Image (cartoon, rainbow, N blue to C red):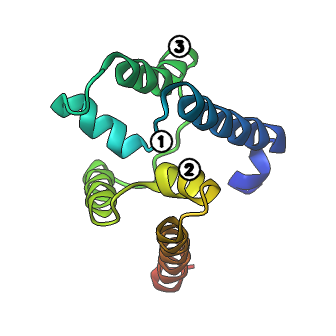
């Protein structure tokens, strides 16, 4: 069974609906874009006025995994590989002036041309990475 077959489709639909609802509520109630990298950066550096909502938002991202557990996690990469990948994601969010949540969810819904380019870049880079890894990996 492939990893995609093991995940019921309803979980993906529910997760996407919750992300969209959270982003919409944050915009409606606070007038803020739900860009995780920006929220995290401003929370860590104390920038941008009121901080409590940022801490609450970030806690809401982490608490469900802490309370319910992450499920079955099968790490196929070493810890150094995961650490380097995380650092590259961080560098990418700085270079792209935002992350997939900010550009892909909020920016596209606001019809931002910059977010369209950023999201297309995310997707094309992911496709290229998968194709390269499949080409270079032994069968």
Give neighbour class at mark 3: few <14, some 14-19, many 20+ (Cα, 10 Å): few
Please tell me whether mark 2 sits on a helix, a strand or a loop: helix
Residue behind mark 2: 106
Please tell me whether mark 3 sits on a helix, a strand or a loop: helix
Question: Can I make out residue 71 in this image?
Answer: no
Question: Do callouts 2 and 1 mark residues in contact (Cβ within 8 Å)?
Answer: yes
Residue plotted at (18% across, 28% down): 46
Q: Position of residue 13 (x, y in %)?
A: 78, 42
Q: Position of residue 75 (x, y in %)?
A: 46, 47
Q: Quadrant of the C terminus?
A: bottom right
Marks 1 and 3, how far apart at CA: 26 Å
Give the vertical position of 30 relative to 14 (above or below). Answer: above
Give neighbour class at mark 1: few <14, some 14-19, many 20+ (Cα, 10 Å): many
Q: Please tell me whether mark 3 or mark 2 is closer to you in this view.
A: 2
Residue behind mark 1: 33
Q: Quadrant of the N terminus?
A: bottom right
Question: 67 and 56: which one is in front?
Answer: 56
Looking at the rendered structure, which numbered label has been put on residue 136? none
Residue 10 position by quadrant: top right
Give neighbour class at mark 2: few <14, some 14-19, many 20+ (Cα, 10 Å): many
Residue behind mark 3: 67
Marks 2 and 1, how far apart at CA: 6 Å
Residue 12 position by quadrant: top right
Question: 131 and 57: which one is in front?
Answer: 57
Residue plotted at (35% across, 36% down): 39
């Amino acid at each position: 069974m492939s990893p995609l077959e093991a995940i019921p489709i309803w979980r993906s639909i529910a997760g996407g609906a919750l992300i969209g609802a959270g982003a919409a509520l944050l915009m409606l109630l606070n007038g803020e874009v739900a860009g995780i990298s920006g929220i995290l950066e401003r929370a860590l550096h104390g920038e941008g006025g009121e901080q409590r909502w940022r801490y609450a938002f970030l806690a809401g991202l982490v608490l469900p995994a802490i309370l319910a557990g992450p499920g079955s996690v099968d790490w196929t990469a070493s810890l150094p590989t995961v650490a380097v990948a995380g650092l590259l994601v961080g560098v990418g969010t700085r270079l792209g002036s935002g992350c997939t949540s900010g550009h892909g969810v909020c920016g596209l819904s606001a019809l931002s041309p910059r977010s369209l380019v950023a999201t297309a870049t995310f997707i094309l880079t992911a496709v290229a990475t998968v194709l390269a890894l499949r080409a270079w990996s032994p069968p």
